[in-house]
Amino acid sequence: MGKRLVNFLKGLEIIDSIIGVFGVGFILLAALFVQFFHHESPCPLCLLQRAAFCGVGLSLLMNLRYGNRVTHWALAILSAITGLSVSIRQALLHVNDPKGFGEAVLGLHMYTWCFIGFFIAIVGCALMLIVYPEKK
């Protein structure tokens, strides 16, 4: 019974990283879709947010390649904190502007969606650190 549980948890570790990689990929593809098909050029803060999402995605890919390690999850959290701070900065720049910057997607602007995505990444990575501690 114990060996089955260990194998099950190891399979879940991989699935969690795969879901995270696909989530980050979806976010980046959505940003590119808005850029190319809605003709909205990204501002420098948007580019920083995309780079932070790339950092989160690379950290999750390292989990898939090298196994579950605390350093990978910590790198993902640090990248997400960086992106979160940039998205907060951009939201605060447009807090008094009734139109905001760029086109709204489902009622929220892209920097708000990025804030939500980074927040979910931070909480998700922290939960993975609790659920799947590094094995010695």
Image (spheres, rainbow, N blue to C red):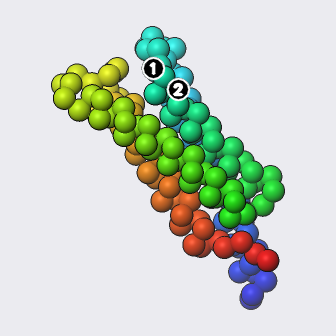
5 versus 46 height, above or below? below
Residue 46 is situated, as x and y percent measured from the top left of the image, at 47, 27
Side (left or right) of 101 relative to 40: left
Sort mark 2 into few (<14), some (14-19) or many (20+) by Cα contacts within 10 Å: some
Q: Residues within 10 Å of mark 1 (few under 14, many from 20)?
A: few
Q: Position of residue 27 (x, y in %)?
A: 52, 36
Q: Say which quarter of the image contains residue 17.
A: bottom right
Residue positioned most to the bottom:
1
Question: Where's the C terminus, which quadrant?
Answer: bottom right
Which residue is depicted at the point 81% across and 56% down?
A: 66
**Viewer-proximal residue, 47 or 35?**
47
Q: Which residue is mark 1?
A: 43
Q: Which of the 4 image quadrants contains residue 70? A: bottom right
Secondary structure of the residue carrying numbered label 1: loop
- What element does badge 2 sit on? helix
Direction from residue 101 to residue 129 in the image, left or right: right
- Identify which residue is drawn at 19% across, 29% down: 96
Please name whichever residue, 92 or 31, is drawn nearer the observer in this view of the structure.
92
Instruction: Give the CA separation, mark 1 to mark 2.
Output: 6 Å
Q: Quadrant of the N terminus?
A: bottom right
Where is 102 relative to 75, above or below?
Answer: above
**Disc 2 marks which residue?**
47
Residue 113 percent location from the top left of the image: 39, 38
The residue nearer to you, when weighing 83 against 17, is: 83
Which amino acid lies under the numbered mark 1 shown in the image of this protein?
Cys
Check if mark 1's residue and mark 2's residue have beta carbons within 8 Å.
yes
Q: State the residue at coordinates (71%, 80%).
A: 5
> Is residue 56 among what the camera can see?
yes
Three-letter code for the amino acid on which mark 2 is drawn: Leu
